[in-house]
Image (spheres, grey):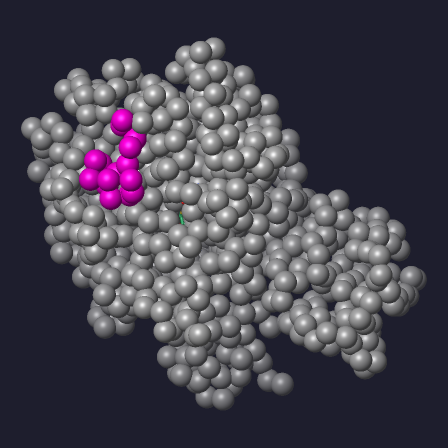
């Protein structure tokens, strides 16, 4: 039966905070939901590939205790026992939960209630601490509550859109598409990008300000000063303005004063301005100040809460906002209710029947793992996050996880660097199976609905939490029969102490019936546009970044995201189509520096070393590198970013400075490079530089490099791939450092292929994947495999459009054939007609002079 004959389920994309509506079928195509307000039918490459992630390899299918399969009963007994022991020995300070913006609101609520209401600890923090904490702090400082004042439509209505530390084209692609469509309809609309790198987002902008990493407060101080000089004024503005006047923006940002002046003039001249900000702002020791410096400029000019005018914090994860709503952070109590207000504390304690409800904030993410390393935490439960990869100072995090008396981890996959370190592993529901709600960047609550039968013994996170709470004697307070029960309870809680006048109050949903919850259409809380009645400008004095380059570590290493990968790659890594654009981690450097370093770079920082390939990026200034945050031990053991990133947090928000790290970059002279395609994954020790990427048909491609003698390197690879029954055909020119080997199985089908040489090979892996897929090889194919002719011939043409799998060569062919615009290229070869994230790259190809051939 073809999948389209199933009725489609209306649900929400599990990736970014845009929160696109999706129409899903168990085995059929995934489509954008035309009725959803966030995307109106659009999807990006990750959303469009969701259908390929429904059957993830390496699912955690049943609970495990100490490496052995256990029943749910036994596993939950062990969790309860471990937490009881830790509480008895160390008190509520000695236990913790570390959760995630990838939980549904209902799971998030359950985790918060369990930690604060049952364990009596405020040590529950979320990976949102790494992501949204600075924006939360800034909103709260400016208008007393964490409310994003705008909506997506404002981006389309603005005449000027300023993007600060946001690579919208890659990280919020559907919003980027909406932005570019609006500008196409109203060409007078202008886009400014503020980012040390010239990103894909900057390609389409009228103005790019490549400021020094960490210097945003200085740039917005110049803007505030300019606006004040233009006569803009507001109550409470004096102190912030005089603080801003003390800051020397050109010196601190390194920007040409004329460029700063141009930006200030554009901003001052435009009533309808939306300033979108993201991780280049939040992930800084001055993150809250950066956000308030932006907000100050909007408050001074009154450009907030009006059509086309707002400071707008973009959320990263699908439910970053939901976590803020339930208050599952160490610095919040529950809902938007506060530790500091006795009436609010008493109301929550009464609602939960929790006399021991903590009265003050607990440990934040980095503190939890520091305490774990120091032996001060006896039991930690992590849920929907991979801290061994994503926290800064990850070498220390790993050591702490390994010495934890009890580490419980809930995830959908077994194959994460964190899951392998857990003593108790619990199988959670994945997207398509779980059911509940999420809230996106513009405060719209949408349903995620299950449409697949969960595999094995996977269960909802809330169910596992409720099971442990029951073992603490609190079955009464956790007796939910489904997510609708939890949602109603959460909604009711937001209506407590109404005299506090909070914007976030969804208590009218507290009596939603099960049927109404099931049918819930996307719904926004609070007003569409919020113009705070009582807002204040927060003075933001200059503070330099903590992670500064110095003589020993002279390069500033930026970290961030790639278009087709999601975080630690547990869900996007297994999809060959999403791996095609960047199959291995690469350090991007200014072209002159890349040429000086060569093919492989050794990066040192924090006493740790990474080894990665090098790529030239003319969009980077001298002395600044960019390394993606995505790779883990699963895909590239030597290519992880976060061992290099020091732990330094914003004193206001507690958010770590993840965006830049001081490092030393040196050439790593490889004596050989190898490409390996095989049915198996090469083990970690196969070579000092190793990355793995899936190819279609269950194959693995590997990129490797070594400093040993090439013959020894080749022999080691052969040994690693050898298996009983394989027959090897070998070809070698040792004096030229060239080795090739193909292994055939008993049926004569290729099983492994090695090409090792002194230069980095550029093999055509598509050709190889097809050769492996064809079963027993005939004589001609055997010869071709061994000769590697087609494989080592012309370098492969990179995929530019991931949605339609269009290569650069195909786009160039369309341009040569006469396509003169991005739209014409799309008409000729479909490139750029999916999510549109590759349109800036297509525009770049159109602008490039054609080389005569
Ligand atoms: N493809 C993809 N999309 C995603 C995700 C993903 O993993 N993959 N994750 C989601 C999540 S959780 C998040 S939080 C968002 C993140 O979305 P973004 O914040 O847009 O993405 P990043 O690449 O982390 O960082 C954005 C930019 O900040 C710049 N930057 C670094 N330092 C500074 C600085 O000091 N000042 C300024 N102005 N800029 C600086 C970097 O060069 C980078 O281009 O993306 C979401 N969407
Ligand atoms: N250097 C550097 N480091 C960074 C960043 C950066 O820009 N630079 N960005 C930071 C940011 S903004 C973020 S958000 C973090 C993200 O970092 P992480 O949260 O560690 O990254 P993920 O890979 O998304 O991990 C989520 C895990 O949850 C699992 N999962 C998904 N859904 C569920 C569910 O419903 N239940 C359960 N139990 N498990 C589930 C997935 O399989 C996956 O293994 O990384 C941060 N780290
Ligand atoms: S922009 Fe892409 S990743 Fe983000 S919610 Fe929409 S489809 Fe998903
Ligand atoms: Mo994030």
Left/right placement of residue 440 relative to residue 784 reads: left
The answer to whether residue 527 is visible is yes
Image position, residue 237 (x, y; %): 15, 34
Q: Is residue 416 above or below residue 741?
A: above
Report the residue that reaches farthest toward the top. Answer: 89
| Residue furthest right in the image | 735
Q: Of residues 340 and 506, which is closer to you in this image?
A: 506
Question: Which residue appears at 88% of the width and 51% of the height?
Answer: 712
- The answer to which image quadrant residue 350 occupies is top left
- Quarter that holds the C terminus: bottom right
Tell me if I can see residue 169 in this picture: no
Of residues 268 and 643, the one nearer the viewer is 643
Quarter of the view holding residue 608: top right
Q: Main secondary structure of the magenta part?
A: helix
Q: Position of residue 288 (x, y in %)?
A: 31, 34
Residue 479 place in picture, x, y as percent: 29, 32
Observer-nearest of 74 and 653: 74
Picture quarter with the N terminus: bottom left
Residue at 54 percent across and 60 percent down: it is 575
Q: Residue at 66% of width from left, 60% of height from top?
A: 700
Q: Which residues are magenta?
A: 476-490
Q: Is residue 692 toward the left or the right of residue 61 in the image?
A: right
Q: Is residue 124 within the magenta segment?
A: no
Q: Can you tell which quarter of the image residue 821 is in?
A: bottom left
> In the displayed structure, would residue 13 be above or below residue 219?
below
């Amino acid at each position: 039966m073809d999948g389209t004959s199933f009725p489609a389920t209306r649900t929400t994309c599990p990736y970014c905070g845009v929160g696109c509506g999706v129409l899903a079928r168990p085995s059929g195509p995934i489509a954008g939901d035309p009725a959803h307000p966030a995307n109106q039918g659009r999807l990006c490459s990750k959303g469009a590939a969701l259908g390929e992630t429904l059957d993830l390899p390496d699912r955690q299918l049943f609970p495990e205790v100490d490496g052995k399969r256990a029943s749910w009963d036994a596993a939950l007994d062990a969790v309860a026992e471990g937490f009881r022991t830790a509480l008895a020995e160390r008190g509520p300070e000695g236990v913790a939960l570390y959760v995630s913006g990838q939980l549904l609101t209902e799971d998030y609520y359950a985790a918060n209630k369990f930690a604060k209401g049952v364990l009596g600890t405020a040590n529950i923090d979320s990976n949102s601490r790494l992501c949204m904490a600075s924006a939360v702090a800034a909103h709260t400082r400016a208008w007393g509550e964490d409310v994003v004042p705008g909506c997506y439509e404002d981006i389309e209505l603005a005449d000027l859109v300023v993007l600060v530390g946001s690579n919208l084209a890659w990280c919020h692609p559907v919003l980027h598409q909406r932005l570019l469509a609006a500008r196409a309809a109203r060409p007078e609309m202008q886009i400014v990008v503020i980012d040390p790198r010239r990103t894909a987002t900057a390609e389409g902008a009228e103005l790019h300000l490549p400021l020094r990493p960490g210097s945003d407060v200085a740039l917005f101080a110049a803007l505030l000063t300019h606006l004040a000089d233009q006569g803009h004024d507001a109550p409470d503005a004096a102190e912030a303005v005089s603080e801003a006047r003390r800051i020397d923006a050109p010196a601190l940002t390194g920007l040409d004063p004329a460029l700063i002046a141009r930006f200030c003039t554009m901003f001052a001249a435009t009533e309808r301005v939306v300033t979108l900000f993201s991780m280049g702002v939040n992930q800084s020791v001055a993150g809250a100040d950066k956000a308030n410096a932006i907000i100050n400029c909007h408050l001074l000019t009154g450009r907030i809460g009006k059509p086309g005018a707002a400071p707008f914090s973009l959320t990263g994860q699908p439910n970053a906002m939901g976590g803020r709503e339930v208050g599952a952070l160490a610095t919040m109590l529950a809902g938007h209710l506060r530790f500091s207000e006795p009436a609010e504390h008493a109301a929550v304690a009464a609602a939960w029947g929790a006399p021991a409800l903590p009265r003050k904030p607990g440990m934040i993410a980095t503190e939890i793992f520091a305490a774990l390393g120091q032996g001060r935490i006896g039991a930690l439960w992590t849920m929907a996050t991979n801290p061994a990869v994503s926290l800064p100072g990850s070498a220390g995090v790993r050591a702490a996880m390994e010495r934890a008396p009890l580490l419980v981890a809930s995830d959908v996959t077994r194959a994460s660097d964190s899951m392998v370190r857990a003593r108790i592993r619990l199988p959670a529901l994945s997207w398509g199976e779980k059911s509940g709600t999420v809230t996106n960047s513009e405060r719209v609550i949408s349903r995620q609905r299950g449409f697949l039968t969960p595999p094995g013994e996977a269960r909802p996170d809330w169910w596992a939490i409720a099971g442990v709470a029951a073992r603490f004697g609190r079955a009464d307070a956790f007796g939910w029969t489904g997510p609708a029960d939890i949602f109603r309870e959460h909604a009711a809680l937001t209506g407590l102490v109404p005299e506090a006048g909070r914007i976030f109050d969804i208590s009218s949903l507290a009596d939603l019936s099960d049927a109404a919850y099931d049918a819930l259409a996307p719904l926004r809380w609070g007003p569409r546009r919020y113009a705070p009645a009582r807002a204040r400008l927060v003075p933001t004095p200059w503070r330099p970044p903590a992670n500064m380059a110095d003589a020993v570590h002279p390069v500033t290493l930026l970290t961030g995201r790639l278009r087709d990968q999601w975080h630690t790659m547990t869900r996007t890594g297994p999809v060959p189509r999403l791996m095609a654009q960047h199959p291995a981690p690469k350090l991007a450097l200014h072209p002159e520096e890349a040429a000086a370093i060569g093919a492989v770079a050794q990066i040192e920082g924090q006493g740790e070393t990474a080894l990665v390939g090098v790529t030239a990026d003319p969009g980077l200034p001298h002395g600044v590198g960019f390394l993606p945050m995505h790779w883990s031990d699963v895909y590239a053991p030597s290519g992880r970013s976060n061992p290099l990133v020091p732990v330094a947090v914003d004193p206001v928000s507690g958010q770590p400075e993840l965006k830049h790290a001081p490092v030393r970059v040196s050439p790593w002279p490889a004596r050989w490079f190898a490409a390996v395609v095989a049915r198996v994954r090469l083990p970690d020790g196969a070579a000092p530089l190793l990355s793995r990427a899936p190819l279609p048909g269950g194959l693995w491609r590997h990129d490797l490099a070594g400093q040993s003698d090439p013959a020894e390197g080749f022999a080691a690879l052969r040994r690693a791939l050898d298996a009983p029954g394989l027959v090897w055909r070998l070809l070698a020119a040792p004096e030229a450092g060239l080795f090739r080997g193909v292994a055939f199985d008993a049926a004569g089908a290729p099983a492994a292929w090695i090409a090792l040489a002194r230069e980095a090979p550029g093999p055509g892996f598509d050709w190889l994947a097809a050769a492996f897929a064809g079963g027993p090889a005939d004589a001609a194919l055997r010869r071709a495999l061994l000769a590697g002719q087609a494989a080592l011939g012309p370098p492969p043409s990179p995929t530019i459009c991931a949605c339609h799998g269009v290569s650069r060569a195909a786009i160039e062919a369309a341009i040569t054939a006469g396509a003169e615009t991005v739209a014409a290229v799309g008409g000729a070869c479909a490139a750029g007609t999916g999510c549109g994230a590759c349109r800036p790259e297509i525009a770049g190809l159109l602008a490039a002079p054609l080389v005569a051939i």
